[in-house]
Amino acid sequence: MADEVGLNTLTLAALAERLGVKQPSLYKHLDSLAGLHRSVSLLAKRELGEAISRAAVGRSGSDAIFAMSHAYRNWAIQHPGRYDVTQTPASPGDTEDENTMMSAVQVIADVLTAYRLEGDDSVDAIRAFRSLLHGFVSLETTGGFALTADIDRSFERLIRGFTVALDHWTDPADRSDSRD
Amino acid sequence: MADEVGLNTLTLAALAERLGVKQPSLYKHLDSLAGLHRSVSLLAKRELGEAISRAAVGRSGSDAIFAMSHAYRNWAIQHPGRYDVTQTPASPGDTEDENTMMSAVQVIADVLTAYRLEGDDSVDAIRAFRSLLHGFVSLETTGGFALTADIDRSFERLIRGFTVALDHWTDPADRSDSRD
DNA sequence: CCGTTTGGCTAACGTCAATAGCCAACGTTG
DNA sequence: CAACGTTGGCTATTGACGTTAGCCAAACGG
């Protein structure tokens, strides 16, 4: 239901009606709307983490990156409502939520090990990859890409660009434009 | 006020109280909550567009990209509430909103002209750049980066990676990992 | 077979967006 | 100056929603 209507507009009244039940009866199964949101968020993080993890097994290097990226995007497109709560951070002290998030990020970290990045270099690469994926998928699912140009192709291009950047991740910083 | 509390939780009651006025009096100055959201969104898009446009004047190539990126991120960090409605697409038929969005995207397109990309190549690059910026800023402002590693550095790294990728944007696609 | 748990219900309250209708201050204009 | 329309506030009310309290019947376990 979150995927159909969006979590923000998912009302307890509507949920009760769909279940053929009166609104207060829901409180026998959930503690609050916020609690429901947390549950959905937790479920979504787990599912997305599993999806990208499954895509990465048996692959490494740029192969794994492409596979994981497509798994990420496909899951997000198929579950837009769930997706947009995958990035809401855990409430302070919610260790279960924190751990779920961390294990999903760990999948990305593992995939990047092929590039032999260490310490901050690795953190930077993980943040970059997460930014890429989230930014593209977020813009796409909210309808931010107005033009009719092929979105699949743009995504492929984006990921390819990332692998190219990874190949030069530890090159010395140089702001000059290498092409002219 | 949107930046302090977030647009989602900005309530008309609270707004009225801050203005020292009763809630229904607000309707003499706005049509609805949705209308207010649209106004804020429109203002935000215009402001962000101007910020990145200002940053890009007099620069070109990767210089312009870095300047624009920092202007984008800084504006978003300083105006988090406004930022997160900059990416909400215009309602169908809202040409004013569409035009505002388009002119902001046009700034990006102009900056990328130095890379001599044409047609779909250009669209792909614009989408990639928007994804990068939005993804990073979105994750950062919502607290998605848990580790204490330097976020400024990660951003710098991300943008540098993009310029590297741009230098090879039109290289033939090749999924093999060039480093091993 | 009796007690407890489970899962529904009605009634009620507070908050919020929104509408209707009233009224005072003010400026314009004949 | 006086009549008048506009502006911008107000109270009262409604409807949707989240939430709590308290009641009750069916199911289930000892």
Image (cartoon, coloured by chain):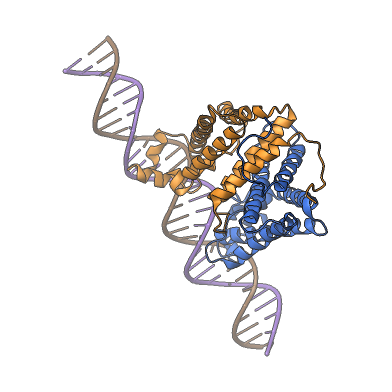
Chain colours: A blue, B orange, C brown, D purple
Percent coordinates x, y for residue B149 in the rendering: 56, 56
Q: Nearer the viewer, residue B84 or B59?
A: B59
Is B88 on the left-hand or right-hand side of B29?
right
Q: Nearer the viewer, residue B145 or A51?
A: B145
Q: Which image quarter is the C terminus of chain A in?
A: top right
Q: Looking at the image, is A68 positioned above or below residue B84?
A: below
Percent coordinates x, y for residue B143 in the rendering: 54, 54
Residue at image point 75% right, 59% down: A53
Q: Looking at the image, is B44 positioned above or below residue A159?
A: above
Percent coordinates x, y for residue B30 in the rendering: 44, 34
Residue at image point 47% right, 42% down: B79
Is A9 on the left-hand or right-hand side of A66?
left
Q: Looking at the image, is B120 positioned above or below residue A64?
A: above
Residue A55 occupies quadrant: bottom right
Q: Looking at the image, is D26 positioned above or below residue D17?
A: below
Is residue B133 shown to the viewer in this render?
Answer: yes
